[in-house]
Image (cartoon, rainbow, N blue to C red):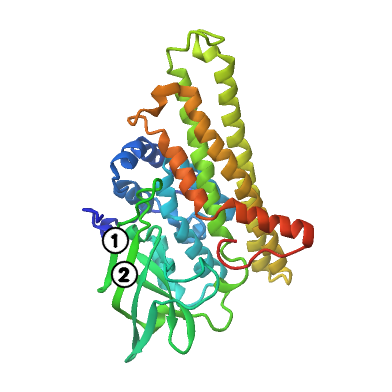
Amino acid sequence: MTSPVSPASIKSAAPITGDGADPFEGILQRIAEGAVERDRSRLHPVEALRELKNARFGALSLPRDEGGGGAGLRGVIEQAIRLATADANVAHIFRNHFLFVERFLVAGPDERGAEWRRAVLDGAIFGLASTELDRKQTGGASDFSTLLTPDGDGYRLTGRKYYSTGTFYADFVLVRATIPGEGGASIVVPTDRDGIERIDDWDGIGQRVTGSGTTVFDNVAVQPREVLPDGGNPPYLLPFTSTLAQVYVTAIIVGILKAAERDAATLLKGRGRNFYFAPSERTVEDPILLQAIGRISSDAFAAELAVLAAADALERVSIARAEGRTDLEERAHEASLIAAKAKIVVDELALRSTTALFDVGGASAALRERGLDRHWRNARTLASHNPASYKALAVGGYEINGTRLPSLGFF
């Protein structure tokens, strides 16, 4: 499935306001209004992304005096929840973007990042192309089939990537590849460069328009300044540097749960009929339906607290890194552990409540025009990215035997 939309057509510009006003409130409302139709008809969120880029949503964590949002990692996660409540697809597009900003512009800035920093401040979105289906492991440390080979004063990049979340809409993409005889490397290139093809072929039951399809690199020219070799233990490869990506996904699931809470209340207030054998003729007084609403609301409350606790733990890691503390890895492990526990709980609460939503509305809640099924489909799809069963196993191993969590991707 290729899209009629040109992914390079989304441009940017204006600064985040500095007067205490919320620059995203109106945007989020408009995004929410179109969420059902975009999901149902598989429409790309071009206008939503244009507005977010103009408001510099992707620059949330960069300093305010540079034109960024001045938010810490908790602030990023709070805004991710808000965006996911409006539309989980749009929120997911920014997952790899914020991971890129944290790894390359905040945690490990260098002179090569100046261009990328300016791009983010101008509204650019960064995607990721890492996954290869011919690898025997999902994540972990092994060579990539995608190759970066020397070519004169530069390189050539050739390979095929899958699940490239956000890349279809991105202005730049970070690619993981192997330099023959040297090892791994990260390459950051503009997505409109000759030889790059972005294919909108993600066919999941949920997260339908997240730009998570295939990315092909056919002999793409790469400049030396666009290459970051893995050698030298760079900051972006330190243990547990992928935890933010996992917390961000969990935050999207929290947003889905909050959207289900919102829609459940709207559904019940607008429901005029009830079963003849129900304990109350009026649905808004039916104790069974009110109990269902109470559980969904409580699930949303607990889920949000859990993911914000994980965000706070990540914030402590960021502060420790800035202070040059020697216990950085221990703090990072603690944040990963909290993130894993949050995911285990949030996944269960979200799937329970997005199912209970249909108990509130009855058969009419299943009408396609309402689009309420998208909440369960999106939550189920996101939760499947990184099964909670493996997270629970890892947490149990640590609690009982002191076995440390895996330190690479997915933790």
Question: In terms of depth relative to the viewer, which is nearer, 59 or 405?
Answer: 405
* Residue placed most toward the observer, 356 or 299: 356
Element type where label 1 sits in the image: strand
Instruction: Bin the neighbour count of mark 2 within 10 Å (Cα to Cα): few under 14, some 14-19, many 20 and up.
Output: some
Q: Is residue 240 left or right of residue 24?
A: right
Q: Earlier in the sequence, mark 1 or mark 2?
A: 1
> Could you tell me the amino acid type at mark 1?
Ile
Q: What element carries label 2?
A: strand
Image quadrant where one finds the N terminus: bottom left
The quarter in which the C terminus is drawn is bottom right
Height in image: 19 above or below 97?
A: above
| Residue 273 placement (x, y as % from top left) | 43, 12
Which mark, by number, is residue 330?
A: none
Residue type at mark 2 is Val
Q: Picture coordinates of residue 173 (x, y %)?
A: 38, 67
Q: Residue at x 39, y 46 (%)?
A: 205
The answer to whether the residues at label 1 and label 2 have Cβ atoms under 8 Å apart is yes
> To which quarter of the image does residue 41 belong?
top left
Residue visible at 67% across and 63% down?
Answer: 405
For the point 42% across and 13% down, which residue is it?
A: 272
Q: Residue at x 52, y 58 (%)?
A: 61
Question: Can you say whether 355 is above or below 251 in the image?
Answer: above
Residue 110, given in percent of the width and then of the height, sits at 51, 76
Would residue 391 be seen by someone viewing this image from the given angle? yes
Q: In the rendered image of this protein, does residue 281 appear above or below residue 133?
A: above
Q: Is residue 72 visible?
A: no
Q: Quadrant of residue 332?
A: bottom right
The image's mark for residue 199 is 1
Badge 2 is on which residue?
216
